[in-house]
Image: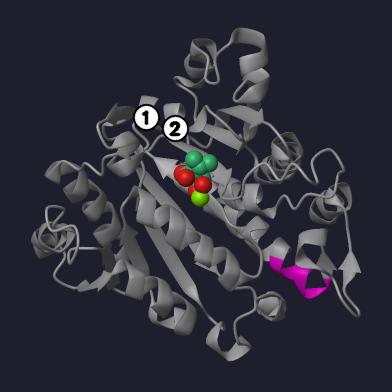
Amino acid sequence: MPKSSIARQYRVVALPGEGIGPEVVEAALEILYSVARLNGFSVTVDYGAIGEPAYSISGDFCPEATLQLCEDSDGIIFGAVSKGGLLELRKRFDLFANLRPVRTFDSLLDKSSLKTEKLKGVDILFVRELTSGIYFGAAGRDEDEKGAYGYHTMHYYDWQIRRIARVALDKANNRRGLLTIAHKENALPYLPWTRLVTEEAKAFPKVIIEPMLVDNLAMQLVINPQHFDVILASNLFGDILSDIGGAIVGSIGLLGSASLNESGFGMYEAIHGTAPDIAGKGIANPLGTLAGVVLMLEQWGEKESAKSIIETQKRILAKGYRTADLAPQGKEILVNTAELIELFIS
Ligand code: IPM
Ligand code: MG
């Protein structure tokens, strides 16, 4: 629910990080301030160090001071990092539920390499488990008589699969009612996602469960993206599959995500990385981070503000304004980051 209507005040922690992170975070914040003014709430922002800049000062990619700053805030807006900091944040705040919506924009259908008629109306929500699996299992490098080797272990407690399943089931229940489970049980039978999710689904009788081998799922996403509603995936599978979402909408620069814990506290970010090749040039696409801000507003219950950003964005794109990543052609108009912000707030 939004905070009391007398004084809706939110404290956000911005962690700009590296590469294009600072540019896209600043852009998204400017748009956030603008909708806050229009819709009668206030946002204060504390800045924290993360990634390379944090390391160069403190010798730590994710310093304790940054984590402390995030405590008791109303949300974290995260830019991008290239080496360390992100996984530590996810773990520290138990941000196990990663929501990655993939919705095509009518005016950008030609930006995807997939056929336009396959893309119209695509509206997929990836629900990715974010604090376990192969990212956090036993790992290391060692050596035996056959040589040096490395290993990462895909480890899941059943309760971890069950709790992310409940998030995905709840989302499917409130959407079109289809939940596709990404699994690999023909090769990894001790991770029985289908059975565990199906057991949890008893509490959601309206939701149809569709288990799908993850390799086939990757292919189906390209062949027939309109089929999907909610896709539930483990940490690694969700990472890989959600990048196909970038190909579907035409640029990974458009996608945002929310990473939430049990109490609804979250971190919001674009799903793209640091893009070092264009960093500092003022041409980055801030719409991915802005999509994160929209998810944050929805999480706060500030539905009107979230809607107004989405509508404004649709109008701007329909008029033909494009950042460089969207490779403007013909009548389309190339804009840099500052010009795009101006279109939002003027
Ligand atoms: C993502 C990113 C991260 C991940 C990297 C930067 C560790 O690719 O958020 O999708 O794999 O989770
Ligand atoms: Mg990724």
Extent of the magenta region: 314-320
Question: How far from the left and from the top, in percent, is residue 6?
Answer: 54, 32
Give the answer, above or below, for where 340 lies relative to 248: above
Name the residue type under label 2: Leu
Residue at image coords 59%, 45%:
293
Horizontally, is 37 left or right of 161 in the view?
right
The 10 Å Cα crowd at callout 2, few under 14, some 14 to 19, many 20 or more, is some
Residue at image coords 73%, 34%:
22
Question: How far from the left and from the top, in percent, is residue 80?
Answer: 62, 37
Q: Nearer the viewer, residue 13 or 92?
A: 92
Hey, which quadrant is residue 314 in on the image?
A: bottom right
Q: Does 319 lie within the magenta span? A: yes
Horizontally, is 239 left or right of 232 in the view?
right
Give the answer, above or below, for where 248 lies relative to 31: below
Q: Is residue 216 visible?
A: yes
Q: Secondary structure at mark 2?
A: helix
Name the residue type under label 1: Lys
Q: Are marks 1 and 2 in contact (CB under 8 Å)?
A: yes
Residue at image coords 61%, 35%:
82
Q: How many numbered discs, if any?
A: 2
Q: Secondary structure at mark 1?
A: helix
- What number is the disc on residue 87? 2
Hey, which quadrant is residue 44 in on the image?
A: top right
**Which residue is the site of mark 1?**
91
Question: How far from the left and from the top, in percent, is residue 236?
Answer: 37, 50
Horizontally, is 150 left or right of 81 in the view?
left
Give the answer, above or below, for where 327 lies relative to 199: below
Disc 2 Cβ-to-ligand 1 distance below 8 Å: yes
